[in-house]
Image: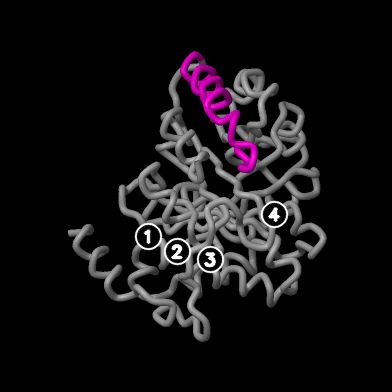
Amino acid sequence: MIFAITALAFVAVPTALSFGITGQSFHNPRSLLMLSDGRRALMGGNWKMNPLTLDKATSLASEVAKLTKDFGDVDVAIFPPSCFLTPVNAEIKSSSVNLGGQDCYFETDGAYTGGLSTAMLKDVGCSYILVGHSERRTVFGEDDSIINKKTLKVLGEGLKVVLCIGETKEEYEAGKNQEVCAVQLEKGLEGVSAEMMKDVVIAYEPVWAIGTGLVCPASVAQDVHAFIRSVLAKKYGDDVAKTVVIQYGGSVKPDNVKEIMGMKDIDGCLVGGASLVPDGFAKIVGYSA
């Protein structure tokens, strides 16, 4: 039943106009070899609560480092579970693969059982930290206020933040994806200056397409990405907005990444399940090869 509803939703919103974006069309594909306005592609592998053993984690990291070494035009980051960060970093430290944390807490230190501070994550080698992932929002109940505090803490630590935004299936079907993304952006970036935006990555992840095998059509994703960039331009100006990397996340696979990355405002992917398969993730990283 869910599959049928989602399919109908695709038919209902295939164009830029359906999203309330007027004027030029944003669907024109670009060269896969060059992103718009000089932005570098960023491919991130979010391992979530996988794999289950240290041996598998280090083996996966080693294979990713080896298989992606020839793709120098693409930035790569992997986000292992926190208990594996140090050994995974040992496997990738001589490569171009960056280490990232899946989450953090906004306090510096203290009596916060289970919490991870940005200083801790930086000390074990992280350069990126995910904030506001849909699973943190929906499963763990994190609201925009908490996400904003985390964003500011990551930036204050001198690390790069990947701020995740996106609508649920119900919001998508109600045509509220723009509204949801605009609110999450505005609240998540409260207090973030134009200068700080150089260390901000936005990841648009339609919740209904995460781990479901369903993929938001590339042209629809492009419309949302263009809208996100327009919100950033209104808040920070065109010069800042055009430099911000905006990733797409949601059932990205080797067989759909080229179409996704052909869109003007999509600058990379935040990959879930496919990042646990070294060969598949390498094909995603090497999408332009």
In the image, is residue 69 part of the stretch drawn in magenta?
yes
Instruction: Say what secondary structure mark 1 lies in.
Output: loop
Q: Amino acid at mark 4?
A: Val
Of the residues tagged 3 and 4, which is closer to the observer? 3
Q: Is residue 55 left or right of residue 191?
A: left
**CA gap, disc 3 to disc 1?**
12 Å
The tag earlier along the polypeptide, 4 or 1, is: 4
Residue 143 position within the rendered picture, expressed as x and y whole percent measured from the top left: 56, 58
**CA gap, disc 2 to disc 1?**
6 Å
Q: In the rendered structure, which segment of residues is drawn in magenta?
A: 55-76
Specify the quadrant of the image occupied by residue 236.
bottom right
Residue corresponding to mark 2: 221
Residue corresponding to mark 1: 216
Residue corresponding to mark 4: 200
**CA gap, disc 4 to disc 1?**
23 Å
Estimate how packed mark 1 is, as few (under 14), some (14 to 19) or many (20 or more) residues with alpha carbons within 10 Å.
many
Q: Nearer the viewer, residue 218 or 156?
A: 218
